[in-house]
Amino acid sequence: MARVKQFDVITGTIGNVSFYTRKGSTEVFARAKGGASKEKIKRNPEFANVRKNNKEFGGCSKISKQIRLSFYPIRNVADYNLAPALNSVVKNIQKMDEEAAWGERSIRLSKYRSILTGFDFNRNNRFSSIIRIPLQWEIKRESQQAEITIPAFACSYGLYLPWKYASFRLVATLGIVSDFMLNPANQTYEPTHGDFSRPQKHIETAWFSTQASIPEQTLSLTLADPAGAFNDDDTLVLAIAIEFGTQDAFGNQISQKGAGAGMVLGTK
């Protein structure tokens, strides 16, 4: 059943065409139903190349999920769907594998870690446009630690306010992402080391008034990965976000979904 949201905006299904919207876009998209059956794609020789692409896409989706889990606590500040954007990033890494055959190429993030540095969670209001002061950060790979130093600043010149909220805080995350490769036994992509439950830490500043002067502070994060469970196939991902908030009925500060911005500061 189709549904009219506005006079000229329809979502739902009319006949053989589906209309839908996407996060981060005001446009309505249309897609025709039909095509080859799943069974035909799975077994028919003419779809051999499709199966190769689908298999590699499955690997990209899995490592993309692990990347998102590495900064899970700040995902809500994103103003668009991060999954396809990260899929595109890791697909470029997968194409760098010139040893494995098409349909079996590995995703060695550990060889191209810097590709994630600066990855933005926002398209309308980017983190660097809201926080207008330079942050100092360091990742200590050997001890699985990271530090972010936020210099003192006055919000009147160091903070851009695209939303009308009275308070804000900064949240930092540190997580681990493993490389992925095809398991020949079951023909599915798996992490070369560890699983989706790799450790992740986050730390928050206090809530500050958007009219205040903020003192210098350092955010420190340490992962508790068991001894020997961290190796060269793993990548540390350090990310940060700014959240804006309001008070609830009991006077507690709560962050507002969709208000804020984030980015990957660096990897190591």
Image (cartoon, rainbow, N blue to C red):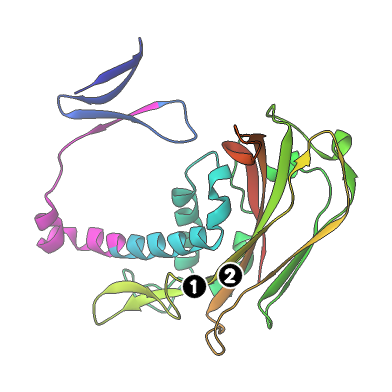
Q: Is residue 208 visible?
A: yes
Q: Is residue 95 visible?
A: no
Q: Is residue 257 left or right of residue 267?
A: left
The residue drawn where x is 64% and y is 65% is 114
In which quadrant of the rendered image does the N terminus lie? Answer: top left
Say if 236 sits above or below 171 in the image. Answer: below
Q: Dot 2, crowdedness within 10 Å: few (<14), some or many (≥20)?
A: some
Residue ID at (83%, 57%): 217
Q: Choose between 35 and 136: the one closer to the eye.
A: 136
> Could you tell me residue 144's position as x and y percent?
66, 77
Q: Residue furthest top?
A: 7
Quarter assignment of residue 143: bottom right
Determine the residue positioned at 56% across, 67% down: 200
The kind of residue tagged 2 is Tyr
- Out of 177 and 210, give the one closest to the viewer: 210
Amino acid under disc 1: Arg
Q: Is residue 263 above or below residue 176?
A: above
Residue 16 or 13: which is nearer the viewer? 13
Q: Which mark is residue 67?
A: none
Q: Residue 234 magenta-drawn?
A: no
Which label's residue is closer to the chain start, 2 or 1? 2
x, y percent for residue 86: 49, 55
- The residue carrying mark 2 is 112
In the picture, the disc for residue 198 is 1
Residue at horizontal 15%, vertical 39%?
34
Left or right? Give the position of 131 relative to 184: right
Q: For the residues carrying marks 2 and 1, which lies nearer the camera in this image?
A: 1
